[in-house]
Each structure stands twice: as C-alpha cells, then as structure tokens.
Image (spheres, helix red, strand yellow):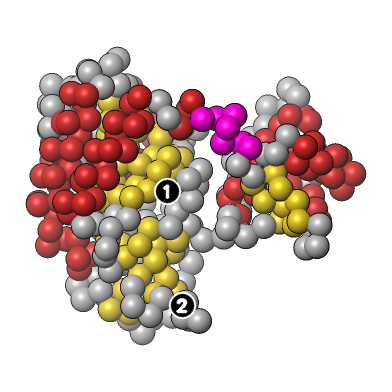
C-alpha cells in the first residue's frame, strides 16, 4: 500500500520542503509516491446555522451534510449524535427514516451509515439541467486540452462555494474534492472570481462580514490589500491565488454568468505552483475560450469588460 503523507512544497521546484506540518486550509496536498493528491481533508466544517423553524427537519439536513463531508468514510450513531448535538434516541429515529427513504444506507455488521444513491434520484433535475450539461462538456474539453485538473463550484447564499463537479487529467496532481464539499467564503480564487464583477455595494456588504484567516504565510489578511486584489482581478480578467489558500498550490478561476448577468458558477484550474505559474498565460487563454463558449451556449448576459465574451 502506498503511504500517504502531507508535505510542504517549495513553490519553485514542486518538491517537499523540510518544514514541519502546520495547519492550513481544509484543502490538503498529500503525496502518494508518484503524484500529488489535492484532498478536502476529513475535518467537519459547520454548515449554515439552523433557523430553529422545524428542528427535526434541520437535524435531518445536518445529518446528511455531516455524512457527506465525511465521505468516503462512514459514520456511526454515536459519532453523529455527539458531533451534531442531537440526542441519541432522536438521532436514531432520524437515521432510520433517512435509511427507509434510501438517502442513507446502514451496514448491520459495522453499524455505519453512508449516503445512498436514493438521494440522487430526488435531486436529479438539479444535477442534470441543460446549463450544467453544457458546462460539463466544455470543462471536460478544457481539461483535455490543458491536461490540468478543474473544479466547478456554485456560490451559495452564505457566500461559501459548493463543489458541483471535478475534472481530472493525467497529471502530477489529482483533485479529490467530493461533490458537495464546501469551500469557505474566503477561499482565495473562487472568492475573487465571484466578487470581482459584483457591484461596489455588494463588495462592501461582503467585506463587512469578512474575517481574515491566515491559511498560509501568503494569505491576504489586510482589508485594503484584499480590496485592491479584487479590483486587480477584474482588470486582469481572471482570479489567481498563489499559495494563499493551500501552501504550494496555485489556482486560477473565472465566473460563469446566467441570462440575467448573475454569477451562477465558478470554475478553477489548480496545480502545484511550479507547474501552473509558468503556464498561467496559456491556461487562462484556454479558460477564456471555454467560458466564452459556455456563455454563448446558455445565452448569458456578460459584463462588457468581462474577457471571453
């Protein structure tokens, strides 16, 4: 079995450094012997605060969210109950109900719960909309051309970003974020790609709730510098993050607009800094070509200064 280890990278050489492990974002670079794996990690991340309107429903949603974030690992009753603060008896009843409707599966031998495919049948229209199908086709073609992995995400009302799909290539690094994984609101590349083409008032509202997090030594933690980078993103025509969210990782991102001019999705290409940085101009050119094809196919209303049309 190949031994995994988390390692720091020298940004210019893509080789592990000798520095000890330190806490970073919930995205982790793991070395698997012959390639790097970009993983979501297994830490539980709190979802939106429940409004307290229908507690039983809110607890059921919390259970689904928790088990989804643990994937591919399963969870047992004790872990779910204690982590979510749901009484054991109530939690057991919810788990039985979710299992009955085939949203969860239960292993009698191990006493573990996992998500089951029944949940997909009840959400199939969301995952197979005409726009999503077009976007998937175009992003798959992009990855084929540039031989770098790509992640498609959707901005949510709490300003976080949920993974809709991922596309891997035969490359030194593989992306393993599960569908449904949430990036925090200050995930560098996605956040800047989302905010750069928003109104000044929308950016102001976002900044009012911003809490700087030093994911790495390169993370921007000054409000004035962050505003300047958001402005630079719009002038540049794409968002970029060089070792700011996960050490050793570079990402470039672009938004996708709908017919009303609203940002409905974002896609980002990532790799080790030493691999992507020298190819940034080429990769961004192909990303702009891709987003232009997407926008024409879905009849998007694109800001006049947005590259790729």
Q: Is residue 57 inside the magenta stretch? A: no
Residue 212: mark in rendering = 1
Q: Residue at x 20, y 68 (%)?
A: 274
Give the labeled residue for mark 2: 5
Q: Is residue 145 above or below residue 7?
A: above
Q: Secondary structure at mark 2?
A: strand
Locate residue 220, reporting x and y percent: 32, 52
| Residue 112 picture quarter | bottom right
- Lateral position of residue 132 relative to residue 287, left or right: right
Locate residue 147, reporting x and y percent: 21, 57
Outermost residue to the right: 89
Q: Does residue 107 appear in the picture of this structure?
A: yes
Locate residue 31, reporting x and y percent: 39, 75
What predominant SS class does the magenta segment belong to? helix
Local crowd size for mark 1, using a 10 Å CA cut-off: few (<14), some (14–19), many (≥20) = some
- Lateral position of residue 47 relative to residue 180, left or right: right
The numbered mark, 1 or 2, whose residue comes first in the sequence reads 2
Q: Does residue 222 appear in the picture of this structure?
A: no
Q: Residue at x 21, y 51 (%)?
A: 144
Q: Is residue 123 inside the magenta stretch? A: yes
Residue 130: mark in rendering = none
Q: Which residues are magenta?
A: 118-124
Out of 124 and 291, give the one closest to the viewer.
Answer: 124
| Residue 224 picture quarter | top left
Q: How many marks?
A: 2
- Lateral position of residue 292 relative to residue 255, left or right: left
| Mark 1–mark 2 distance (CA, rounded to whole Å) | 28 Å
| Residue 29 picture quarter | bottom left
Out of 136 and 260, give the one closest to the viewer.
Answer: 136
């Amino acid at each position: 079995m190949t031994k995994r280890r988390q390692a720091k990278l020298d940004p210019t050489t893509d080789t592990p450094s000798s520095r000890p492990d330190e806490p970073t974002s919930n995205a982790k670079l793991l070395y698997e012997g012959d390639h790097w794996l970009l993983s979501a990690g297994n830490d539980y991340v709190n979802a939106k605060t429940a409004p307290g309107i229908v507690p039983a429903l809110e607890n059921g949603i919390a259970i689904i969210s928790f088990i989804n974030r643990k994937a591919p690992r399963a969870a047992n009753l004790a872990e779910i109950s204690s982590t979510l603060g749901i009484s054991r008896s109530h939690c057991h009843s919810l788990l039985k109900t979710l299992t009955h409707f085939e949203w969860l599966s239960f292993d009698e031998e191990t006493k573990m719960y996992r998500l089951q495919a029944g949940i997909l049948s009840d959400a199939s229209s969301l995952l197979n909309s005409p726009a999503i199908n077009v976007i998937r086709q175009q992003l798959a073609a992009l990855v084929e051309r540039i031989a770098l992995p790509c992640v498609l995400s959707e901005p949510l009302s709490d300003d976080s970003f949920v993974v809709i799909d991922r596309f891997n290539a035969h490359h030194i690094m593989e992306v393993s974020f599960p569908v449904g994984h949430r990036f925090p609101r200050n995930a560098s590349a996605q956040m800047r790609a989302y905010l750069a083409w928003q109104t000044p008032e929308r950016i102001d509202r976002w900044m009012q709730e911003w809490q700087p997090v030093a994911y790495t030594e390169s993370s921007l933690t000054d409000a004035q510098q962050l505003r300047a980078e958001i402005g630079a993103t719009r002038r540049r025509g794409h968002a970029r993050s060089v070792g700011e969210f996960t050490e050793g990782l570079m990402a470039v991102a672009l938004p996708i607009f709908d017919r009303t001019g609203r940002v409905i999705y974002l896609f980002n290409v990532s790799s080790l800094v030493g691999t992507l940085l020298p190819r940034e101009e080429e990769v961004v050119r192909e990303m702009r070509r891709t987003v232009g094809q997407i926008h024409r196919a879905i009849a998007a209303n694109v800001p006049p200064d947005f590259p790729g049309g």
